[in-house]
Image (spheres, helix red, strand yellow):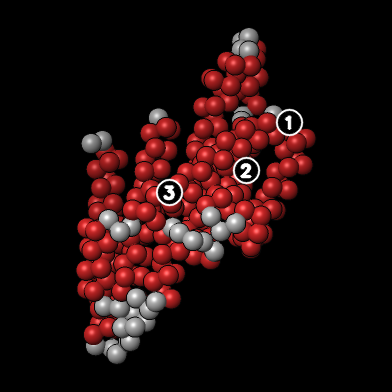
Amino acid sequence: MNGDGRKNAPHRLSSRLVQVAFLAIVLLAWFLATTRWGVSRILLPNPVNVWHQLIDIVASGAFIPDLRITLGELAGAFAISMSLGVTIGYLISRSRYLIRVFEPLLAAIYAIPIILFLPLYVLLLGLGPASKIALGATISFFPIVLSTIAGFGYVDRRLVTAARSMGANNIQMFRYVLLPAALPVVLAGLRLGFTVALLSVIASETIASFAGLGHHIVDLAENMDTARMFAYIVFVIAIVAFLNAVVSTIEGRARW
């Protein structure tokens, strides 16, 4: 370990301790609320019961059909938004005029809560996976295309001029100048787009869907099975954290 690593180690340890302590306080307050403070277990189940339900969900594999649907919708949405966002963003970034026209326009559209258009997607594509994929792809498209424009469109012009003066052709320019300079920004946009797609898919499942993890959580809430509902919420949070960790790891390795 180098000197910087040794200096930062105590800070990382203290950060982890604070995070663990915060989680422990939340769990303790949750437990006391349901056992000592008179909070109705219909509204807030005991965390011990939630834990038992979570173990049962994982052990029985009851989550697999819904997880398969949610992950399939996520994969479809992210594949569409990534391919379109990177391609369109790169094409726009090749022209200063197109950047001036489309960058603020796309940023303005991204500021609109696009999930409000879910009823329109449902009317056009139905309650099945197609509407969730379309909505997730639409919402996640914008951070990806904007980051691609920023990454490729604002490369230091001195690097481009130097490469051209040394006789670099378009392919060499892209491979050795544009891509290395833009990659960190593009990867950050892809990570954000993946997260947005995941959240959009799950959110849309809770509003209008026949299947998926979000739909299952709403179904449990309607049947007042709050302990199992909270267990599914915890399970979804764990899945989201795991997927984000995987994407962050891929991003970190790709930077090197």
**The one of 99 and 128 positioned closer to us in this rendering:** 128
Secondary structure of residue under mark 2: helix
Rounded to the nearest whole Å, what is the CA distance between mark 3 and mark 2? 25 Å
Depicted 155 relative to depicted 216: above or below: above
Local packing at callout 2 (Cα closer than 10 Å; few below 14, some 14-19, many 20+) is many
State which tag comes first along the sequence, 3 or 1.
Answer: 3
Q: CA distance from mark 1 to mark 2?
A: 14 Å
Q: Amino acid at mark 2?
A: Leu
Residue placed at 26% from the left, 38% from the top?
3
The answer for how far apart the CA atoms under marks 3 and 1 are is 36 Å
Residue 63 vertical position relative to residue 226 in the rendered view, above or below: above
Which residue is labeled 1 in the image?
95
SS class, disc 1: loop
Q: Tell me what residue is drawn at x 37 percent, y 82 percent.
A: 43
Image coordinates for residue 113, horizontal then vertical, percent: 63, 61
User: For the point 24% across and 43% down, which residue is it?
Assistant: 6
> Crowding near pointer 3: few (<14 within 10 Å), some, many (20+)?
some
Please provide percent x and percent y for residue 179: 54, 27
For the N terminus, the quadrant is: top left
Mark yes or no: residue 17 visible: no
Most foreground residue, 122 or 164:
122
**Placement of the C terminus among the 4 image quadrants:** top left
Q: Amino acid at mark 1?
A: Ser
Q: Which residue is mark 2?
A: 146
The residue singled out by tag 3 in the image is 71
Asked if marks 1 and 2 touch (Cβ < 8 Å), the reply is no
The number of numbered badges drawn on the structure is 3
Q: Quadrant of residue 158?
A: top right
Question: With 119 as the anchor, is 240 left or right in this view?
Answer: left
- Of the two numbered discs 3 and 1 in the rendering, the one whose residue sits closer to the viewer: 3
Give the label, 3 or 2, closer to the camera. Answer: 3
Q: Position of residue 169 (x, y in %)?
A: 63, 13
